[in-house]
Amino acid sequence: MDEAIRIEALVKNFGRTRALDGLDLTVRTGEVHGFLGPNGAGKTTTLRVLLGLLRADSGTVQLLGGDPWSQATELHRRLAYVPGDVTLWPNLSGGEVIDLLGRLRGGLDAKRRAELLERFDLDPRKRGRAYSKGNRQKVALVAALASDVELLLLDEPTSGLDPLMEDVFRQVIRDERRRGRTVLLSSHILAEVEALCDRVTIIREGRAVESGTLTELRHLTGVSIRAELAAPADGLARVPGVHDLQAQDGQVRFQVDPGALDAALRELTSAGVRSLVSQPPTLEELFLRHYDRASRAGVAR
Amino acid sequence: MTALTGTGKLVRLILWRDRVVLPLWILIFVGLMASIVASFQGLFPTAAERQSYADASAADAGFTSLYGPLHGSSLGELSVWRAGFYPVLIALIALLTVIRHTRTEEETGRRELLGATVVGRHAGVAAALLVTLVANLVLAGVVAAAMAGQNLPVAGSVAAGLQLAAAGWAFAAVGAVAAQLTSGAGAARGIAVGVLGGTWLLRVIGDVSGLSGGGVSWLSWLSPIGWAHELRPYAGEQWWVLILPVALTALGAGVAMALEARRDDGAGLLPDRPGPAAAAPALRSPLALAWRLHRGLLAAWTAGFAVVGVVLGGAASSVGDMVADNQNLEDIFTRMGGRTGIVDAYLVSVMGILGLMAAGYAIQATLRLRAEETGGRAEPVLATAVGRLQWAASHLVFSILGSALALVAAGLTVGLTYGLSSGDVGRQLSRVLEGALVQLPAVWVLAAVAVALVGLVPRFAAVAWGALGVCAILGLVGAALQLDQWVMDLSPFTHVPRVPGAALTATPLVLLLAVALAVGGAGLAGLRRRGIPAA
């Protein structure tokens, strides 16, 4: 089985609100998959469907080769989950919660637990009510990461962590990938996804709007070019696939689709190129562009 | 006073959040007070009947411990006396309200959100107290109007209302102080309820001792519940007594704010001890987790049941003495619902009240499921290899067996104290225990109603308390109001065999069990099918 998660055309409604609107998501075994979207896009709902906590209204969902709703308990032995908003029992200590959740899942690696406590610099003796948001998140992370499971479902796991701890988190996730575990990492922190993930799915209003490796996504979205020209390149605006063209004082900036790159460069060289910078878009640009475009389309509608 | 800045805004917030609950409990108590007057008027229409009832009751230790001292035989005196437990209930509501709007807000972090806006350090406590105190005054006013409206003397009616408000005021202040002591709202509630229970017992001991001219009758004066009774509505009102609860309220508010000024947001004065770094080997199942979550509450309820059992059981024999030489009164009691013996009738009504209380525990334990769900603590457990039914069962064990344990505790203490005083422990213990245990199927029906609400309409889970309220009203005043039988039949407690005394019939118990199973089963089926957390 080379797919840990396969979701097709998933729909989930809450009353009249459509939280998921035909979502597709595939996570291959052994990869770290970024699940990217702003607040309210449907990331948490998707994870809850994957956990069998919510029932899909339509569409197919496969998790580790099984049905997450009807086989929830068996499947849960093979995965660990870190909720986005971790709340702990006020009178249980962090250490007790870690052990309890690990045991309920079917076992915990004591050595790994100690190592993770050390790396995350977490005091396991505090009571649940005494932890800060970041420390509650660490409790849930240690409980998940110290379990011997195939799949990790992480819902914005670093939203309460400081930069030092975020760095520790990244190292730990890289370790996990080396161990061959599959990770679905929901996040709205682009740098984190860019640093960790093999493949990315961008979700917007309950639909996957982009999915693929970062290279593929960049390829799809094209290249950003800035050039200093000897003469105005008037033909550039007529090249199909050139977007967002700005020309000023002999400088041009534009975005170009991969298929149109050749034609665009020809227009530039015919005008005479003094300097040229070409950049693949950052994930951030990809993301913003997508949302920007979508919201503009939304306004036009 | 910058420390109080924003109090007005917080008052409005509390009023908005409690816009249903606040008027509701005021109305319920006004209705209860008015219905007691009507019921006494119906049961004892003539002054002579009231006099003979009062003569016997005033000297009775059982009644005195339940309702407080009785000073005269007028309709007003009898009614207020019979409502003698209401100040305790009002006190309970007042302290819970104050803690809910102070420590609970702080524990959940909502106070931090507000505290960062233009809101003074003491505004939260001040607003919670202000709302509770004014609500109690409104209650006093409406009760006074309702009593005076039934042609009772105006001064006494005002005192009857203030009697309730005085208890509410005193324990609003107790709640405010308790809320400063611990970082958890549950522990704060425990402390405040403990103080309430302790002062109630002081009053009971003081009043019962006063019956025989005993030496410790002054104990009642240490108890705010005792003060409420000493106001003596319709019996030559002692208005000056009101100084005591008002002074205690002022003192409590001052202490609460002084304590608040000395601590950090979120912290209590009593320090949190660090917990273990690793879980005990036994903490490895949902049941073990549920035990950790329920054990404090269960222990408190069981201990409370045992104590109440001692008090009520101790009163049982004096109920018998009282009527032994009073044929008139015996007739009255038989009319009020007794079957064979007066003591049995008393024990049946005691067990009925304990059954209602046990149902309160069962509902509270069941609603823990919903609290875990909305608090986000169900999700991490259900994301492990724990099935939903297994998770639900781990909590329901406590509502089912915990309520049984509490009833057994009360049955044992009632049976032992009554048995010892009547010199027949062996026989009475088993009869009384039987009377306690027959309540269980009815208790479980209410627990099942709570399960059904959680499973099928989780947003309305708290309606389970309403169901308990309906049962309590039907059980306590339904007969006096002469409601139709089909209305009375709505309460599962109506169907409980009136043991000890009447024959123990299995049919209603089996039927109640079947209803509990069906309703609870429907709830569990709903829980399996719905999303968690429910939208």
Image: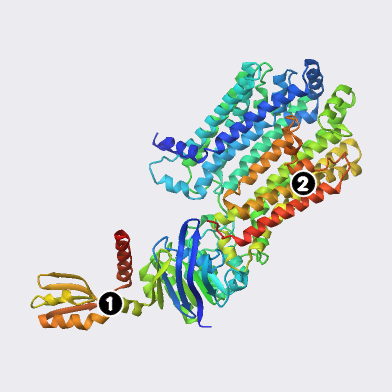
Q: Nearer the viewer, residue B393 or A240?
A: A240
Residue A165 appears at what percent x and percent y? 42, 67
Residue B250 appears at what percent x and percent y? 53, 30
Residue A233 horizontal side relative to residue B513, left or right: left
Q: Amino acid at mark 1?
A: Gly
Tell me the distance, in whole angstroms, between the alpha carbons under discs 1 and 2: 74 Å
Residue B256 appears at what percent x and percent y? 52, 37
How is the model colour-coded?
rainbow
Residue B231 horizontal side relative to residue B137, left or right: right
- Say few, some or many: other residues with alpha carbon within 10 Å of mark 2 (under 14 / 14 to 19 / 20 or more): many
- What residue is rendered at 52% in x and 58% in y? A87
To which residue does mark 2 refer? Answer: B407
Q: Quadrant of residue B276?
A: bottom right
- Say few, some or many: other residues with alpha carbon within 10 Å of mark 1 (under 14 / 14 to 19 / 20 or more): many
Q: Is residue A115 visible?
A: no
Local SS, label 1: loop
